């Protein structure tokens, strides 16, 4: 391939390669040439142009394939465009000569087609450069058209289209001729020619005005003929032509004023004629005299095509036109279904309604913005009102209009109501004005239709009501009440009973789509109504049928409410079901004997309804469907089966009109049985199977009804053969009615009223249950698949044999119908076998099934062949051993080798593919070679595209399933694919589709191997890329989608080899495709690309935006691809247009991936994009400015206005649809994601830093700089009409508050940047607290309010008033009894709202108390001093009395709901304060979310006066928890059950245990998924609760409770990693110890006082008792030790001897944080206090553990530090050792010896740390010295007086004096001072004797060698101080000797006065120090000092000299100070005042 990459064709290389490779070589050269010419200049190709033209012209004669000839023409046109045009006409003549050539041989045809293609490309590209060559060309083409075959005709029409496109008005003279040939070609037998002709005429329409003036009727007639017998592509093309043609009549009025202008009514008349009459004549006259002679039957293809044309017509005129002409448009569209001609039969009526609904959905639903849609809803309401006026008063039969008008009005009403429902459902709460406007309430309008005489209209109205309530949940309860009231009032009206029952069922079905639900009581009320209807049905024969139907329909709707509602009614329901059916065969016989036709009709309808309600019950209440319930349900079900077996006799005797009723019963029975386990009715299998088989084999059914399930049971990959890809188009709603053997387009609501309450697919706007006949067969087929796997083999054999007999006995069309049903059932059974993991082991059964299947492989019906192939594959899967597979495969091989007919080849080809698909490459590996070779051969059969398609499809299946085993066949298959892509005509679209599938399978087989370059991999990769390029240029959307999917796979496996610079623009163009398949494939590919290379995707997409700016022609409405908003903006706009769920999901994923990748670097762009989406609330086309906008926004709007109106007064007819609410919600969520992306980077949340970075970088890519945009975005969203958007806005606002609340304002110290947005926050929250706001919005607003109030942003108390008032107003929602708000939603929603309010107040109170209890922080900031600390608490204080009741009541509820299931019987029957007993399960999540801050707030309140209030309980509000709990406001006047009031102490105890129990239960929960914040709140609540003395006494009163608490603390430590949590655990543990200590002290005091009075033996207190045993599980001390040990080991793994070295090393590398150090220090202090809780013997038990852990911490953390500071943990360890050493138990006679022994061991351990064998860098010597000093100074002498320990201690001190580090020396000397002053002189004396001489020796050495470092100076000073200390400790008799040692040393440090000024800083410091110390010692010891001075005169002289010098220096300093303090002379001011103020007196 590389040889083909040259400007000129490498003819030498072309000659050398194989003949089969030459087309690929040429194509690759042309691809390269195309790329080169795009970027080339004239000079680049000047020298080689002539030869290049020659080479290209020669290729025209080389019979190029379709892709090659397209590329050939493109290259020639580009060559002349770039280079010289001197040989242009030679090339034109050359092509014309080829076209004129008379050679009609097949070999010459490709050259002729190539010439036509080249001419088309040249005219398209060069336009008027082609000069006057066009007459000959057009003439030749028209002549050639007459004798051309289909491919030639298609190519000629394409060429004519391109000539018209390129030449424009220059070819006006030939417009008529082109028009004539095109009109006739529009009815060509080839569908591809019709498509090409329609496109040609569409191009001609741009210039030829006669087409939409004088020739309009002829054109419309031709279009209708073209639609007759058309396929989907033709319908799309012709509809576009027809729609644009008619739109031109309105947008381009005739220039000649005399010409008659075609009015809109004329256009509508033309369209309606085609819609209603089809191919029948519609011209009343005219010169042409043409009249269509066909009959008056409506042609469905034409009707669907006209439907498309309506949509194109409106879209061409634009949304502005539609808004202005909406009323006329609606009136006309509804006339289509009101005309009897379009609804002659029920099926026609259904199809016509679908077409009209599709028109409305595509125009009103797709083109209009939300505000315009609201107006459309009003128009629809007027239409409905008008139609109801025709009907007259429904209650008065006499006042009704004519029966015909009433009958036709139903269809108008159905269409209008369905569209109204769809619009309102899409608008959601944006449609609220439609309900609130007094002039027009849509609910009233729709409810009025419930009394329409037509059941279909009533059903449509009911469905519309369901849509309204789903969109506006606040209307659900009022509408339900209204319907129930009307039902009761009009119980005697058949229409009323029917209509209101429909409405109630629909409303109940909509409850599941309303998260807030309905009150539980409504379910009870509705059940009562249904039961009453059923009870009174027999009282009035006229109403029996309607009441029976209504009651069961309502009961079925009730089941959708779920188990909470149904559970209470289940016994009654079971009774009703049982009584509906005969209980025995005797009862059934008596029924048959006495029943008349009407009685049977009522009975059958009732039983069908009962079974339907049962089906609803089983589906919607699965938790209630227990084995017992199933057993009880089987009684009526078995009766129903028995009845159906005998029903044929009843039908014979009573009339055929009962057939429908019986069919409905069968349908319901089959559907119920399918939901129940088959084992429950295995005894009835035989009878049931007999019924099922008779059903779908049409035994008793004269109609040839077929099932609709066949396509769905075939594999998804068979969509090409089954043509099911039509469901992946935008037109599937109407196109499905044209599909053969498919009833999916004929669904209508009236076929099954129960569909009102069933869940529908998201893609459907209205439920479409199939006709009864089809639905029964579908249900029987589905149930057959469930039952067969459980049936014995002998019965299966009989069934398959019966199938064969049924097929043989049927003829022609009936045989086809039976075969389709039978094979659908077989597929269902085989699928059921596979799903249940069962196998067909019986050989006879396999043989019978195989015989049935193999015979169908040669059926003429392609759908049946496909089903047979699928069945064969599934047979091999569930029943095939290797011999069966081999035999089947061999049979197919033999057939394929001998068969020559298309049917046999296609069927057996697919059979091979299905075999491999279901058994895999391993299962059919031995047949792989044969299968592939046969299919490769068949795929080359160019005479039969059908055979090619099936063979290629089978080949793709084998490649998909073959895996690595197919690898050796990749090259030949890939070669075939490429060859066929280059040769197969484009019109054979199905072959190209299969080639795409085959290529995708080959890419999957190659997989990651595609990345390499070994062997043939590079060639294979290139071939794949070439194949993709060919398919990309194909005009069919399915092929284009396959090409994109293949490129997506290539990118996944070999991303480096896929050129994104060409792929991304291609995908962007595909996003604007009218075909859903292409758009879906493009977005799916972009989703994958954005996950890897989001930046590249965005950049390449932006190149299209820059190209569109450069090339203004691209910027039209249709062709504009990417604007300045980039791909992201385009994807956002697609969200407003797309309705496909899969596509929307992929768009969301793509945008999210791009956001996460790009938002961090391009923040401003993403924020502006999201802001633009959210702010676009005004309708397009009305550029209004909103008030209150800032200047930047006004500037932006001005700029946009300039862009929009820069061209002058041109009116925008096609404005973009304003963003709809789902898009705006996604935009708000995207802003939240942007904040999350920035999280973690402090610059984004620091204004000062961001401004500094902006100055450095010049960019504003920091989030804090866009805070105003963020707040405004949140405000817009939070105050919108859409509830979903409001919630998203509030969540965004909360994120903003959480992230920016504490960001300071640099320009105003002490203030926060969020202060300036207080008004916006308050305004955003205010609407959410109104009375009509949904509960979930209010709950969210409460959360935001608490976050705002607690954020600390507000500077002043008044700043919080707005939000505080909102929170106060929310308390009204908590009212109970009189004055409580009206309940619109479920109890669960009410609970959620109330708990949200309570939780918000709890969070505010927590913050207020934290501020109140926090110590004042004074940092010199005036703001801090001014700020009132208690301001927030003052706000809460007024409501605190009520709030405390709410908090405690909510906690009581939570505690009750948290009880295990076995205690549910003990729960209060009336429920709790905030929950209803029926809604317990649904309210638990709300309590789970809210309880944690409430429990902390309650603990704070109890600890700060709450217990005292409960103790007083002045108003009796605080009741016992076992009775009613706290009495809430509003309950005082209600009758409460009288309960015995508890004493205050018990009440306090109740509430203490409530708080304590909730916290402990939560912390000890098995789930470790509890949010960390909840754990934190629990721990803080426990700590707060235990801060008071009474709660501590309550805790300590029961040691087991304390142990339990500590065990829970231990569990928290094990399950939570955060240090903050651990610290909270430690604080709670300290409170527990404090509680036990207080209890112990109290006991001791009580005992001592008792002992003083009565005397007696001394008692032992504390744990351990006299024995000293500490019992785990009962001991508080042991539990505390567990907690302490866990903390220490978690923070310091080295304390655990069993820990690995790797863990130790990682710990040492990480080190301890400050938080961890604090945690360890606190833990050590706790441990040190533990012995005090024990008895003497008990303390001995725990002391070794405490000492071991303490010394371990000392060892691990006493590391040398650079600054010489001691770690906090070391300090804590030393303090702990001191506490232990000074314990009272040290001197207790009971344990004195044990303590001394253990303390000695501890000292020995510490001394061992400093042994010479240790690395001295491992441990800090200073810390060890301090530790030893602790023992020496604090412990009894018996501990340290041991000689060995004493010696080691002295050596440690001596070692410190010899240390090279000054800090160690200094610390050693300081510690020595402590030791020397030890109160136990006998312990200190040895140290003085050993260390004193060393100090003297050190100081003597300093005299002659003074230090030159500050550190050494400090050591000398400390040594001198220590000597002074020794002097003081010496006896007076020996003090002279000590002074004789000290004074000379001090005097030696003095410097002579003459050199003092010049000496070093260190010497001067020592001089000053020594002089001061001497001056201090002399007065202390005067006599001794004189003695020393007298003995050494030289010392005295030196001292006196220094003293004198010191005094003189002091005098000089005084004088200098006095002079400096003298007042200075005044200085003249530098600024002269011009005005004299000397006379100013104030």
Image: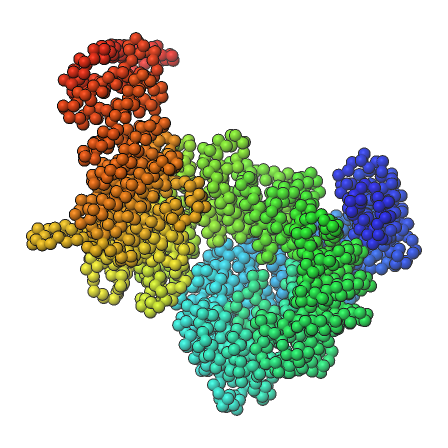
Figure check: 1212 above or below 196: above
Q: Is residue 920 visible?
A: yes
Residue at image point 52% right, 78% down: 679
The answer to whether 574 appears left or right of 1035 in the picture is left
Q: Residue furthest right?
A: 102
Quadrant of the rendering where the C terminus is positioned? top left
Residue at image point 62% right, 48% down: 1089
- In the rendered picture of this protein, how many numbered marks are placed on residues? 0
Residue at image point 18% right, 44% down: 1787
How has the structure been colored for display? rainbow
Figure check: 736 above or below 1756: below
Figure check: 2013 above or below 123: above
Q: Is residue 401 visible?
A: no
Quadrant in the rendering for residue 935: bottom right
Where is residue 1735 shown, x and y percent of the image? 20, 51
Residue at image point 20% right, 61% down: 1542
Query: Considering depth in this image, is 541 or 837 the residue closer to the camera?
Result: 837
Query: Considering depth in this image, is 1392 or 896 the residue closer to the camera?
Result: 896
Where is residue 1756 shown, x and y percent of the image? 36, 41
Where is residue 689 shown, x and y percent of the image? 59, 81
Where is residue 77 shown, x and y percent of the image? 81, 44
Query: Considering depth in this image, is 51 or 140 the residue closer to the camera?
Result: 51
The answer to whether 708 appears left or right of 191 in the picture is left
Quadrant in the rendering for residue 880: bottom right
The answer to whether 292 appears left or right of 780 in the picture is right
Figure check: 1240 above or below 1519: above
The answer to whether 186 appears left or right of 1377 in the picture is right
């Amino acid at each position: 391939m590389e040889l083909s990459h040259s400007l000129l064709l490498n003819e030498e290389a072309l000659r050398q390669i194989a003949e089969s490779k030459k087309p690929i070589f040429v194509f690759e050269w042309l691809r390269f040439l195309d790329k080169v010419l795009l970027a080339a200049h004239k000079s680049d190709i000047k020298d080689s142009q002539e030869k290049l033209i020659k080479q290209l012209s020669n290729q025209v004669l080389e019979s190029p394939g379709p892709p090659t000839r397209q590329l050939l023409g493109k290259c020639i046109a580009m060559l002349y465009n770039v280079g010289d045009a001197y040989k242009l006409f030679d090339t034109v003549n050359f092509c014309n000569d080829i076209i004129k050539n008379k050679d009609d041989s097949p070999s010459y045809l490709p050259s002729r087609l190539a010439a036509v293609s080249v001419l088309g490309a040249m005219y398209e590209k060069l336009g008027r450069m082609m000069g006057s060559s066009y007459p000959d060309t057009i003439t030749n083409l028209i002549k050639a058209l007459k004798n051309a075959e289909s491919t030639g005709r298609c190519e000629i029409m394409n060429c004519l289209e391109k000539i018209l496109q390129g030449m424009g008005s220059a070819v006006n003279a030939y417009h008529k001729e082109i028009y004539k040939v095109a009109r006739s070609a529009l009815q060509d037998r080839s569908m591809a020619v019709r498509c090409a002709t329609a496109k040609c005429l569409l191009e001609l329409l741009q210039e030829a005005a006669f087409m939409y003036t004088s020739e309009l009727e002829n054109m419309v007639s031709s279009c209708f003929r073209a639609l007759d017998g058309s396929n989907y592509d033709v319908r799309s093309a012709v509809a576009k032509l027809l729609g644009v043609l008619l739109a031109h009549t309105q947008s381009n009025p005739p220039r000649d004023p005399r010409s008659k202008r075609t009015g809109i009514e004329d256009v509508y008349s033309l369209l309606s004629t085609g819609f209603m009459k089809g191919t029948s004549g519609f011209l009343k006259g005219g010169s042409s005299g043409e009249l269509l002679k066909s009959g008056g039957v409506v042609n469905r293809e034409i009707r669907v095509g006209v439907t498309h044309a309506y949509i194109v017509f409106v879209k061409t005129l634009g949304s502005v036109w539609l808004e202005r002409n909406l009323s006329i448009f609606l009136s006309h569209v509804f006339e289509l279904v009101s005309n009897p001609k379009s609804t002659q039969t029920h099926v026609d009526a259904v199809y016509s309604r679908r077409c009209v609904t599709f028109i409305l959905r595509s125009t009103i639903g797709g083109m209009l913005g939300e505000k315009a849609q609201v107006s459309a809803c009003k128009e629809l309401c007027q239409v409905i009102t008008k139609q109801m006026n025709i009907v007259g008063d429904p209650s008065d039969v006499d006042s009704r209009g004519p029966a015909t008008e009433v009958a036709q009005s139903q269809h108008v009403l159905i269409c209008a109501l369905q569209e109204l429902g769809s619009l309102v459902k899409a608008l959601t709460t944006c449609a609220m004005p439609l309900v609130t406007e007094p002039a027009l309430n849509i609910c009233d309008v729709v409810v009025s239709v419930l009394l329409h005489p037509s059941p279909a209209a009533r059903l449509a109205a009911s469905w519309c009501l369901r849509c309204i309530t789903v969109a506006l949940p606040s209307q659900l309860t009022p509408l339900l009440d209204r319907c129930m009231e009307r039902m009761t009032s009009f119980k005697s009206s058949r229409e009323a009973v029917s209509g209101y029952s429909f409405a109630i069922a629909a409303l109940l079905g909509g409850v599941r789509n309303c998260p807030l639900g309905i009150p539980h009581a409504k379910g009870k009320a509705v059940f009562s109504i249904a039961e009453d209807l059923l009870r009174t049905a027999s009282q009035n024969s006229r109403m029996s049928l309607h009441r029976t139907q209504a009651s069961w329909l309502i009961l079925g709707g009730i089941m959708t409410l779920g188990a909470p509602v149904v559970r209470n009614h289940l016994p009654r329901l079971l009774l009703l079901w049982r009584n509906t059916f005969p209980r025995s065969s005797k009862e059934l016989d008596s029924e048959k004997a006495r029943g008349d036709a009407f009685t049977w009709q009522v009975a059958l309808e009732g039983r069908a309804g009962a079974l339907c309600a049962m089906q609803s019950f089983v589906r919607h209440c699965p938790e209630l469907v227990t084995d017992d319930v199933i057993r009880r349900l089987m009684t009526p079900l078995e009766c129903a089966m028995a009845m159906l077996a005998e029903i044929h006799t009843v039908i014979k005797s009573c009339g055929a009109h009962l057939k429908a009723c019986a069919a409905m019963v069968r349908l319901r029975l089959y559907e119920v049985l399918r939901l129940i386990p088959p084992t429950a009715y295995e005894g009835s299998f035989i009878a049931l199977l007999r019924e099922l088989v008779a059903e779908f084999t049409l035994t008793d059914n004269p109609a040839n009804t077929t099932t609709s399930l066949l396509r769905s049971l075939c594999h998804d990959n068979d969509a090409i053969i089954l043509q099911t890809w039509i469901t992946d188009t935008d037109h599937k709603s109407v196109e499905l009615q044209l599909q053969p053997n498919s009833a999916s387009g004929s669904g209508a609501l009236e076929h099954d009223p129960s569909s009102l309450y069933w869940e529908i697919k998201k893609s459907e706007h209205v439920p479409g249950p199939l006709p009864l006949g089809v639905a029964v067969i579908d249900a029987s087929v589905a149930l057959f698949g469930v039952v067969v796997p459980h049936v014995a083999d002998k019965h299966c054999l009989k069934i398959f044999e019966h199938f064969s007999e049924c097929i043989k006995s049927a003829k022609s069309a009936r045989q086809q119908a039976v075969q389709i049903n039978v094979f659908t059932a077989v597929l269902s059974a085989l699928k059921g076998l596979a799903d249940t993991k069962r196998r067909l082991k019986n050989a006879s059964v396999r043989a019978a099934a195989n015989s049935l299947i193999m015979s169908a492989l040669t059926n003429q019906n392609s759908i049946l062949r496909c089903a047979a192939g699928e069945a064969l594959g599934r047979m091999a899967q569930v029943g095939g051993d290797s011999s069966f597979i081999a035999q089947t495969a061999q049979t197919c091989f033999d057939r394929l080798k001998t068969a020559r007919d298309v049917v046999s080849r296609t069927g057996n080809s697919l059979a091979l593919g299905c075999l491999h698909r279901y058994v895999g490459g391993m299962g059919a590996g031995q047949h792989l070679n044969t299968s592939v070779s046969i299919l490769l051969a068949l795929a080359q059969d160019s005479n039969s595209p059908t055979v090619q398609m099936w063979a290629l499809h089978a080949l793709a299946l084998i490649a998909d399933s073959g895996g690595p085993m197919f690898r050796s066949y990749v090259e030949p298959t890939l070669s075939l694919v490429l060859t066929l892509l280059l040769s197969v005509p484009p019109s054979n679209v199905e072959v190209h589709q299969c080639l795409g599938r085959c290529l995708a399978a080959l890419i999957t087989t190659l997989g990651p191997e595609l990345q390499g370059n070994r062997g043939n991999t590079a060639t294979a990769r290139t071939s794949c890329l070439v194949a993709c390029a060919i398919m990309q240029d194909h005009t069919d959307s399915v092929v284009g989608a396959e090409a994109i999917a293949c490129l997506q796979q290539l990118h996944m496996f070999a991303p480096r080899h896929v050129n994104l610079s060409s792929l991304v623009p291609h995908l962007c163009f595909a996003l604007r495709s009218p075909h859903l398949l292409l758009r879906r494939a493009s977005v799916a590919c972009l989703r994958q690309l954005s996950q890897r290379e989001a930046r590249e995707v965005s950049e390449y997409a932006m190149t299209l935006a820059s190209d569109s700016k450069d090339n203004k022609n691209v910027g039209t409405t249709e062709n504009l691809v990417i604007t300045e908003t980039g791909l992201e903006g385009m994807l956002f706009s697609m969200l407003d247009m797309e309705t496909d769920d899969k596509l929307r999901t992929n768009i969301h994923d793509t945008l999210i991936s791009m956001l996460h990748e790009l938002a961090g670097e391009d923040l401003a762009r993403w924020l502006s994009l999201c802001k633009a989406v959210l702010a676009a609330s005004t309708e397009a086309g009305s550029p209004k400015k909103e008030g209150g906008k800032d200047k930047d926004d006004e500037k932006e709007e001005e700029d946009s206005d300039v862009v929009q109106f820069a061209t002058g007064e041109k009116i925008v007819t096609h404005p973009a649809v304003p963003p709809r609410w789902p898009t705006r919600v996604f935009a708000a969520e995207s802003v939240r994601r942007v904040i999350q992306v920035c999280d973690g980077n402090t610059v984004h949340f620091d204004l000062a830093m961001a401004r500094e970075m902006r100055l450095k970088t010049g960019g504003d890519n920091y989030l804090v700089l866009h805070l105003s945009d963020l707040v405004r975005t949140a405000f817009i969203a939070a105050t919108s009409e859409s509830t979903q958007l409001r919630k998203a806005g509030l969540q965004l606002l909360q994120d903003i508050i959480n992230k920016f609340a504490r960001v300071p304002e640099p320009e105003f110290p002490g203030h926060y940047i969020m202060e300036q947005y207080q008004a916006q926050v308050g305004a955003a929250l205010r609407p959410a607290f109104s009375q009509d706001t949904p509960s979930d919005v209010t709950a969210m607003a409460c959360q935001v309010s608490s976050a705002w109030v607690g954020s600390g942003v507000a500077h002043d108390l008044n700043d919080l008033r707005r939000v505080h008032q909102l929170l106060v107003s929310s308390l009204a929602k908590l009212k109970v009894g009189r004055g409580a708000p009206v309940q619109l939603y479920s109890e669960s929603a009410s609970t959620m709202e109330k708990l949200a309010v309570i939780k918000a107040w709890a969070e505010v109170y927590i913050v207020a108390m934290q501020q109140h209890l926090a110590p004042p922080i004074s940092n010199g900031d005036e703001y801090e001093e001014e700020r009132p600390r208690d301001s927030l608490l003052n706000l809460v204080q007024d409501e605190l009395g009520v709030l405390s009741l709410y908090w405690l009541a909510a906690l009581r509820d939570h505690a009750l709901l948290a009880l295990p299931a076995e205690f549910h019987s003990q729960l209060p029957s009336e429920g709790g304060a905030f929950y209803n007993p029926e809604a317990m399960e649904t309210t638990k999540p709300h309590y789970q979310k809210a309880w944690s801050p409430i429990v902390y707030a309650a603990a704070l309140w109890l600890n700060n006066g709450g217990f005292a209030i409960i103790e007083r309980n002045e108003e009796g509000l605080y009741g016992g928890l076992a009775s009613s709990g706290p009495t809430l406001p509003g309950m005082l006047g209600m009758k409460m059950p009288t309960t015995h009031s508890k004493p205050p102490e018990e009440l306090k105890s109740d509430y203490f245990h409530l708080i304590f129990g909730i916290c402990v239960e939560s912390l000890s929960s098995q789930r470790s998924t509890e949010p960390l914040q909840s754990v934190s709140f629990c721990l803080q609540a426990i700590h707060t609760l235990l801060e008071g003395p009474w709660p501590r006494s309550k805790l300590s009163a029961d040691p087991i409770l304390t142990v339990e608490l500590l065990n829970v603390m231990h569990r928290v430590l094990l399950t939570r990693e955060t240090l903050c949590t651990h610290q909270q655990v430690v604080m709670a543990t300290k409170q527990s110890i404090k509680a036990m200590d207080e209890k112990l002290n109290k006991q001791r005091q009580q005992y001592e006082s008792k002992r003083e009075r009565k005397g007696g033996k001394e008692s032992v207190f504390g744990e351990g008792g006299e024995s000293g045993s500490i019992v785990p599980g009962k001991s508080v001390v042991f539990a505390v030790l567990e907690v302490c040990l866990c903390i220490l080991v978690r923070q310091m793994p080295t304390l655990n001897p069993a820990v690995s070295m790797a863990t130790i090393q990682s710990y040492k590398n990480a080190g301890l944080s400050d938080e961890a150090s604090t945690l360890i220090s606190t833990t050590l202090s706790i441990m040190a206090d533990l012995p005090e809780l024990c008895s003497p013997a008990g303390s001995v038990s725990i002391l070794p553990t405490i000492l071991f852990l303490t010394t371990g911490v000392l060892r691990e953390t006493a590391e040398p530090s650079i600054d010489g500071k001691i770690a906090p943990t070391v300090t804590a360890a030393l303090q702990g050792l001191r506490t232990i050493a000074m314990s009272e138990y040290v001197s207790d006679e009971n344990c004195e010896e044990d303590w001394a022994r253990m303390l000695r061991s501890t000292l020995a351990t510490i001394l061992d740390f400093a042994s010479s064998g240790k690395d001295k860098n491992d441990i800090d010597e200073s810390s060890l010295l301090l530790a030893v000093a602790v023992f020496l100074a604090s412990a009894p002498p018996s501990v340290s007086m041991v000689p060995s320990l004493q010696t080691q201690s002295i050596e440690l001190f001596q070692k410190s004096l010899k240390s090279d580090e000054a800090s160690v020396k200094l610390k050693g000397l300081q510690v020595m001072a402590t030791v020397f002053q030890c109160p136990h002189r006998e312990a200190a004396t040895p140290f003085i004797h050993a260390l004193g001489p060393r100090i003297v020796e050190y100081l003597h050495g300093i005299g002659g060698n003074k230090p030159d470092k500050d550190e050494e100076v400090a050591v000398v000073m400390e040594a001198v101080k220590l000597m002074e200390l020794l002097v003081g400790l010496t006896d007076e008799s020996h003090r002279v000797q000590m002074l004789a040692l000290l004074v000379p040393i001090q005097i030696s440090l003095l410097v002579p006065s003459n050199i003092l000024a010049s000496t070093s800083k260190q010497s001067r410091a020592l001089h000053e120090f020594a002089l001061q110390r001497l001056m201090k010692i002399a007065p202390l010891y005067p006599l001794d000092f004189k003695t020393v001075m007298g003995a050494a005169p030289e010392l005295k002289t030196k001292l006196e000299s220094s003293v004198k010098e010191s005094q003189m220096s002091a005098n000089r300093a005084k004088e200098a100070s006095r002079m400096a303090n003298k007042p200075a002379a005044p200085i003249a001011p530098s600024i002269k005042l011009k005005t004299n103020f000397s006379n100013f007196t104030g």
